[in-house]
Amino acid sequence: MSQLLEILEYPFNQRALLIAMLIGFANGFLSGFIVLRRSALMVGSLAHTLLPGIALAIATFGVLNAFTAFFGALFAALLVGLGAILVSRNSRLDGDSALAILYTTAFAGGLLLVDRMSVNSELEHWLFGNILGLSDADLWLAFGVSALILLCLASLRRPLVIMLFEPAVAETLGIPVRSLSYLLMALMVLGLITSLQAVGCILSLSLLVAPASIVYLFSNSPRALFWGGAIIGALSAAAAVFLSNLLGVRTGACIVLLLGGLFGIAFLISPRYGLLAAVGKVPSQHDH
Amino acid sequence: MDRQRRHEIAYLPQREEVNWDFPLTVRGLAEMGRYPHVGSFGRFRKSDRAAVDASLESVDLTALANRHIRELSGGQQQRAFLARALAQEAHVLLLDEPFSGLDLPSSKRLATLITELKDAGHLIIACHHDLDTVPKIFDEVLMLNRRQIAFGRVADVFDRERIDAAFADQDEPQGGDKS
C-alpha cells in the first residue's frame, strides 16, 4: 500500500494516472459503439494512419509536440477514413478493401517521410506510448477531447444505437444516418489520437475495442456496454499506471495486457456467452 | 416525407437481415419505435412507456419483454418487430417476407395478428411467396413478374392463369402480394 502511495508522490505519476483514467474512460465509452458497429478492423487501420499523420506533422510544422501530432494525425486519419467512405459509396468496392488500399498507401507514404527525416527518439513514444513523459498541455488536450467524445456520444446515444442496429430503418425514422456515421468516424479518430499518448498508435486499438467487448459478454443493454466499457477502460488504465511503476515496465503495454487478460477471463466465465457455459451445452435455442 | 408523418410507415426487415447479436431486449426494440415521437433529445415520457406496453400487449409479448431478441422463436421475433411498428403508431406496415422460415403454428398466429391489425385500421403491405395462404390472409394482391401481371381483389384476380403468368419463363420469378 505504502508503495502505491509513494508512486503518487511524483507529479508525473499523478498526471499519468489522471490522463490514463481520462483516456481509458472516453475510449472505453467509445468502444461500445465500435463493437456494435462491428468496425474494429476499420479502427485498426485508422490507428495505423496515425503514423503517417505524425510524420506529416513533423514535415509540416517542423516540430513534434502534442498539438502538431494531433493535427497531423487527425488530418491523415480523416483523409483515409472519409476517403474510404467516399470510394466505397461511389464504386463497387467494399469499404474494407477501400480502407486497406488507402491506409497502406498512407502508411507507406509516412514511412518514406520518416526515412527522409532524421528520426528523433520521440517517434518511439508515439508508436508505443509514453504516458510518464506527458505535460500539462497533454493533460488538457486529453481532457478536452475526452469531454467532447463523451458529450457527443451520450447526447446522441438514442439515434446512434438505432442506426447501428438497422441503418435502413433508422433512415425511415428520420435519423440523419449519413451525418451520424461521419460524426462517429471523426470521434473514433479523436479517441485514437488521445489513446496515442497512453499506449501508442500500434496498441491504441485495444482501448477502443476491448472494454466494451468484455461487457458485451455479460450484458444485453447498450447503456451497460457504453458506461461499463468506460469504467473498465478507466480502471484498467489506472491499474496499469501502478502496475507498470511497480514492475518497471511500459504502461501502454500494461494497459493492453490487462484488458486482454480481463477479456480472457470474461470469455471463460460469462454465464451466457462464455466458453465454460458453452461446454457440454447444446447450441442455444435458435430461430425455428 | 415531412417530419410529422415520419412515424406513419413502419418497415419490418427480413429476419436474415437482422443482427441478432445486438444487445437488445424485446422492450428495447419496441422502444425504438418511439423515436419519431421522442426525437434524439426528448425525454421518454409516461405516454411513451404506455405506448410500448400496449404494443407488447397487443402482440402478446409482455411476458417476454426482457428477453434478448435472439432468445425468441421465429414467430416471436416477427411479433417483436410488429410491436415496434405499433409503438411507432404507424398506420402503414411494410412486411418483407414475414412468414419465411416460420413453422405452421407460428405462421397461423402471425396471420391472425395481421388480420387483427387490418381490422384495427392498419394498411398492411407484404412481400409474400406462399400461394396457398394468399386468399386466407390478404384482401388485395399485386402480382409481379418484372412487370405488373395483375392487381385487384384476391377473389377477382388471383386465379390459375395469372399465377402461371406470374411465374412464367422469366429467370427470376417474383411475386408481390398486398392486402
Image (cartoon, rainbow, N blue to C red):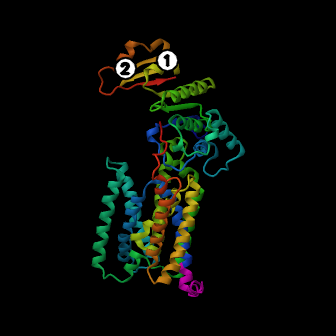
Chain designation of label 1: B
Q: Furthest residue to the front?
A: A280
**SS state under label 2:** helix
Q: Which residues are magenta?
A: A1-16
- Residue A107 lies, with reference to residue B112, above or below; the image says below
Residue under label 1 = B135
Disc 1 residue crowd, few under 14, some 14–19, many 20+, Cα 10 Å: some
* Residue A210 x/y as whole percent: 47, 63
Residue at image point 44% right, 81% down? A249
Residue B26 sits inside the magenta stretch: no
Q: Is residue B159 left or right of residue A20?
A: left
Residue under label 2 = B166
Disc 2 residue crowd, few under 14, some 14–19, many 20+, Cα 10 Å: many
Q: Furthest residue to the right?
A: B46
Residue at image point 39% right, 23% down? B144
Residue A5 sits inside the magenta stretch: yes
Q: Amino acid at mark 2?
A: Ala
Of residue B152 and residue B12, the one placed in the foreground of this image is B12
